[in-house]
Image (tube, grey):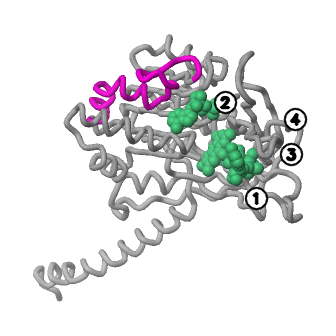
Amino acid sequence: MYSQSTVIAGGLAHIPVVIGVFSFIQKFFSKRASQFPQDTEQKKSPVKPVEQKSAPKPAPVAKAETNTVVKKKHADVPVNIYRPKTPFEGTVVDNYSLLKEGAIGRVNHITFDLKDSDPFLNYVEGQSIGIMPAGEDANGKPHKLRLYSIASTRHGDDFNGNTVSLCVRQLQYEKDGETINGVCSTYLCDIKPGDKVKITGPVGKEMLLPEEEDANIVMLATGTGIAPMRAYLRRMFEPTEKEKNKWNFKGKAWLFMGAPKSANLLYEEDLQRYLSDNPDNFKYTKAISREQQNTKGGRMYIQDRVLESANELFNMIEDEKTHIYLCGLKGMEPGIDEAMTKAAEEKGLNWSELRPQLKKAGRWHVETY
Ligand code: FAD
Ligand code: A2P
């Protein structure tokens, strides 16, 4: 016979054992979750935006294991479904110029069909894919892959969830009086619908959007740096995309866009449509370097526009719901830093202290190349 107190004492004595077993189960599932990253939205949304085919099944994410929200979100993001040794061969669906008459250079929008990938090559906005150009390098070895930011949302441009799109500028430069064409960018700008292309990835967790619908998103882009921003803006403002993603963006989106000429502005018609449909949620500021001048009489760059808007911008940055995304030319980073330093000073803030804080909080996102 057990007395009531013996039963209670016995029960209490088992608590550490129960906690131990529970914690083991939590750790086990948490490890699995990070091995099999999935699209968070697919789990939440009744509409399955991207078919999973034989991709790994979602593992339950342990509740108390991860100590920050940022960590948990990132664990769901797909990475390296395809690697260089076993790339997926995607079929080109579309390849067209994004430039207008009189533009400088060559910039194309290129779409690949992913539907035959198994496991399915799914991705989220802000990630990149690798492209392995056909042919061999000077040493007779296959060309190495190059990364490109994904310009489509996970639902693809046709909203069927079976494609991925890129925005590619052909690299061209002069050397010893000769024009040199970049290997992969030229390959991509030249490919035709029906061609097969080796694709790896997806990769990247630096440029992901926050989940909060009331986040503010400041975007600083030069040239093809618009690619991830185009995906974000479609996710926020493109009506059919919104129906699919069920993400009801309520914050402010502000795009600073740098291009050499008006004819080089990318996705301009879509951006103008988003502006007229969403005047309270979208702001679009252009720096057209070879048509506009900054206050010193030099080329107008996005950092000059940042300075012009210092007060408004820093009011936004002081709000912890604001994220800043920088994408495009590596060379713009010092200029942006300088502009942010001056802009911060005007508000009595110290940018060299603030920037690491923003970075640590997962609110400062940079992808330059
Ligand atoms: P390559 O044949 O590899 O030539 C490049 C090399 O040429 C350079 O390494 C350098 O050695 C040399 N070179 C370049 N310019 C000069 C010069 N002026 N003078 C002398 N030598 C020079 N690109 C896009 O178009 N769109 C994107 O969305 C995009 N996203 C990217 C995302 C990430 C994360 C990264 C890392 C890069 C991204 N890029 C993007 C750049 C892309 O990966 C390639 O680097 C670019 O297309 C050039 O590759 P290529 O094979 O054509 O050039
Ligand atoms: P510019 O080339 O007139 O000096 P694209 O990739 O289509 O050429 O666009 C890149 C844009 O970024 C151009 O307007 C280019 O100006 C501009 N740019 C070039 N260097 C910098 C820099 N250091 N900081 C900011 N913008 C830059």
The answer to whether residue 100 is above or below residue 321 is: above
Q: Amino acid at mark 4?
A: Lys
Q: Which residue is label 2 attached to?
A: 159
Sequence-wise, the earlier of marks 1 and 4 is: 1
Q: Residue at x 86, y 60 (%)?
A: 138
Q: Which range of residues does the magenta coloring cover? A: 290-318
Query: For the residues carrying marks 1 and 2, which lies nearer the camera in this image?
Result: 1
Mark 2 lies on a secondary structure that is loop
Q: Are marks 4 and 2 in contact (CB under 8 Å)?
A: no
Give the label, 2 or 3, closer to the camera. Answer: 3
Residue furthest to the top: 276
Q: Which mark is residue 144?
A: 1
Q: Mark 3 falls on what kind of element?
A: strand
- Residue that badge 3 annotates: 196
The extreme front residue here reads 176
**Residue bearing the label numbered 4:** 192
Q: How many marks?
A: 4
> Is tag 1's residue or tag 2's residue first in the polypeptide sequence?
1
Few, some or many residues within 10 Å of mark 2 (<14, 14–19, 20+):
some
